[in-house]
Amino acid sequence: MSPSVPLQEMIRAIRSAKTQCEERGVIQRECAAIRAQFRQSDNGGRSHNLAKLLYVHMLGYPAHFGQMECVRMIASPRYSEKRIGYLGAMMLLDEKQDASLLITNSIKNDLFHSNQYIQSLALCTLACMGSAEMCRDLAPEIERLLRASNSYVKKKAALCAVHIVRKVPDLGELFASAARSLLTEKNHGVLHGAVVLITQLCGQSPEALKRFRKAVPDLIQIMKSLIVSGYSPEHDVSGVSDPFLQVRILRLLRILGHNHEAASDTMNDLLAQVATNTDSTKTVGNAVLYETVLTILDIKSESGLRVLAVNILGRFLLNNDRNIRYIAMTSLQKIVGTDHNAVQRHRGTIVDCLKDQDASVKRRALDLSLALVSASNVRSMMKELLVFLSSCPPDLRSQTASGIFNAAGGDVRDETVPNLIQLITNASELHRYTVHKLYRALVTDISQQSLVQVACWCIGEYGDLLTGPCQEMDPAQVSENDVLDALETVLQSHMSSPATRGFALTATMKLSTRITDNVDRIRSVVSIYGSCIDVELQQRAVEYNALFKKYDHMRAAVLERMPVIEKTSGQSNGVPSGDSVKDNQPVKVMPGESLLPQPPADQVEGRVRVSPHLWRWRGAVAQGVVLSSTAPSVPVYEKDGVTLTISCDKQSDSDLTVTLTASNSTESDISSFMLQAAVPKVCFCPQTRAHTHKQTHNGS
C-alpha cells in the first residue's frame, strides 16, 4: 500500500483485514510512512497524514508520535490545518503532557482572531483539555469574549468558562457579572451556555447562589416565553419548544429555590403552568415533566403543587416504558416519608408493579409497597405482599419476608427466637401441633436460620410428641431416626451458623431422654463434636459427654423439659429490663439438701471461671431447675487457701436464689482478688433474679 493513499482507502484496507495480525501489519506500514513524512520539512499532506493517524488512534493503536505535529499545525495560518491540529490536540493531548503547554500561546493568539470559527476552535480545545495553568492564563480572554457581540462566540465562551470554573473555582467571581448579562440574550445557544455556567457557579459558591437568586424573575420569563411561543422549526422537538433549555432552567430553579421560601413562591405559578401544559404523550414531554416534578419536590412549594407533582409520577407508573416507571418509583420512594398521603392514592398502581417482568421495577415496587404499609391498610397490603412472596424471585424473598415481618409487627424486638420460644412454652395445648409443624418446616428448608433454631429447640423439648399423630395435620409417620437425621442435617450443613449448630446439638442431647432406641447413636454424634474447631460447640459436646459418663444417673433429671416461661412487668419480650435487675434485693439462703453435681472449675491468672454450659441444663442452678426447697453449700473451688462454695434457695417454681461465698483460710490477706462467673443470656429467664454477694474471711 502506498504511503500517500487517501484516508478512505486506508480505512478500507484495515476493515478488509481477515486477521488481527494482518490488521496490525497494515497499520504499522502506514504509521511508518506517516512518521517519514512528518520528518520532512516541506510536507504538503500534513493534515491528510494527521487525519489518518487520528483514525489509528481511535482503533486503540499508539499515536503519541503525532503530538508535536498537532502543535505545529495549530500554529499554521491555514484554517484547514488549524482545524485538524486542534482536533488532534483534543484527542492526543491532555493536561498531564508537557506538549499541552506549547499550545497555550497559539490558543491565546487565536482567541483574538477575526475569524469566528478559528476563535471557536481555540475555545473548544481549551474547554476540552485545558489545564489549571492554561485556565488561569487565558481566563481574562474568555471573560472578554463573553461580552462580545457575536452570539456564536459567546455560546462557546460560556461553555469554556464552565470548564475553567471547574478547574479553578477561585475564578468563578470573574465570570459572575458576564454570566448574569447573558440572560438577556435571545439566542438559545447563548442562553443555554449561560444557564449551565450559572448552575456551576451556584453549586460552588454560596455567595454566587445568593447573588443569582435575584435572577429568578429573568429565568421565569425565559421559561414562559418557551412555553407560550409558537412553532419554531429551529428549536421544536416533538412539539416541545427547546426541551434542552427548559430542562436546564428547571434544574437551575431547583438549586435557587432550595430552602428559600421567597424564591420558591416566585416560581410556584410557573411550575404549575409547566406541569399542566406540557404534553405527556411523548418522551421529550415526560423529560420536562420529570424535571418539573423534581423541582417542585425540592423547593418550598405549596401543598397543592406537591400533590400535582405526585400525581404526575402516578401517571408515569402507567407508562409502557419501564424506564419511566422505574424513575417514577425512585422519586416516590424519596418523598413517601414527607408526602405519605399523596403517595397512598397511587397504592394500587404501585402494587400492580410487583407483577412487572423487569427485575429492577419489581424491586423498586417492593420497596415502595413496604413503605406504604400503615395501620389503616395493613390487612390488605399483607395479602398483596404474601401473594407476591409466593411467586417472587429468590433474591427478593428474604427482603419480602423481612419487610412483611417488620410492617406487620413494627413493635417486635429483634430477639425473635426467644420471643417465639416463650410463646410456644406458654401454649402447652399446642405443643404437639407446633413441634410437628416446625419439624416439617425443618425437613423442607434449613436456610432460614432463626426458624431452624426455634425448630431445634422445640424438637429437643417436645421430640417425644413427634412419634404420635397430630389431629390438626395430615397423618405422617415420623420415626426416631427421621428426627435424628433432620438434626444431623442441620449440624452438617454449611448454611448453619455456629449458634444454630449449638441449638441442634443440645436438641440431640435432650432427645437421649425422650427416645429409647437410639441413645448410642446420640452418644456417637455428641462425641464427634468434642473435637470441633468451634470452641463453643466443642465445649458443649465435652460437657454433654461428661453427662453421659460421670453423671449418667442424673441425665434424665438434668435434661427434662423446661418450665413455663412467664413475663413480668419489669421485662420486655422476655428480657429483664435494667431497672428490674437493679431493684432486686439479696435473699437470705437457708441450707438444705442438694441434688447438684459439682461442676469443674479452673483458674486462669487468678480469675475463677465456671463453665457456662453446665448451667444451661435442666438440673443446673441458673436455668431454674426443680430442686428441693433448700440446698446446702457445695464447694466448687478450693486451692491455695481460697474456697468457693455455692448454695441455693428455691423460693417458688420460678424463683431461685443462688449465693456464691468466697473465703480465705490463710494467715495473710489476699489483695486484687477478682471473681468472674460466665452466665449465658438464656439463664436470665423470666422470674429469675440475679444477685452477687461476696464474703471474705481472714483466717477462718
Image (cartoon, rainbow, N blue to C red):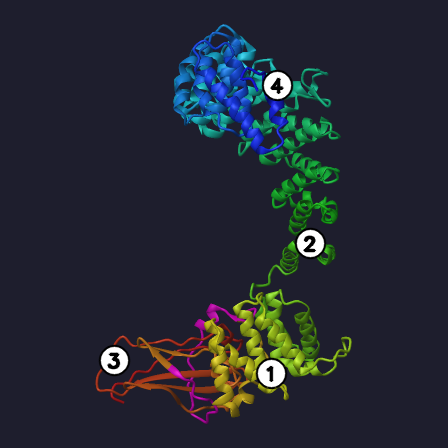
Is disc 2 placed on a helix, strand or loop? Answer: loop
Mark 2 or 1, nearer chain start: 2
Is disc 4 placed on a helix, strand or loop? Answer: helix
Check the image and name the residue furthest to the bottom: 593
In this orientation, which residue lies closer to the viewer: 277 or 87?
A: 87
- Disc number lying in front (2 or 4): 4
- The magenta stretch is 572-601
Name the residue located 61 percent from the left edge and 19 percent from the top edge.
9
Name the residue located 57 percent from the left edge and 16 percent from the top edge.
5
Please say whether residue 292 is one of the residues in the magenta stretch: no
Q: Is 524 above or below relative to 387?
A: below
Please say whether residue 585 is one of the residues in the magenta stretch: yes
What whole-number distance in Å separates the C-alpha atoms at marks 2 and 4? 52 Å
Mark 3 or 2, nearer chain start: 2
Q: Residues within 10 Å of mark 4 (few under 14, many from 20)?
A: few
| Residue at numbered disc 1 | 511
| Residue at numbered disc 4 | 8
Q: Residues within 10 Å of mark 2 (few under 14, many from 20)?
A: few
What whole-number distance in Å separates the C-alpha atoms at marks 4 and 1? 85 Å
Is disc 1 placed on a helix, strand or loop? Answer: helix
- Disc number lying in front (3 or 4): 4
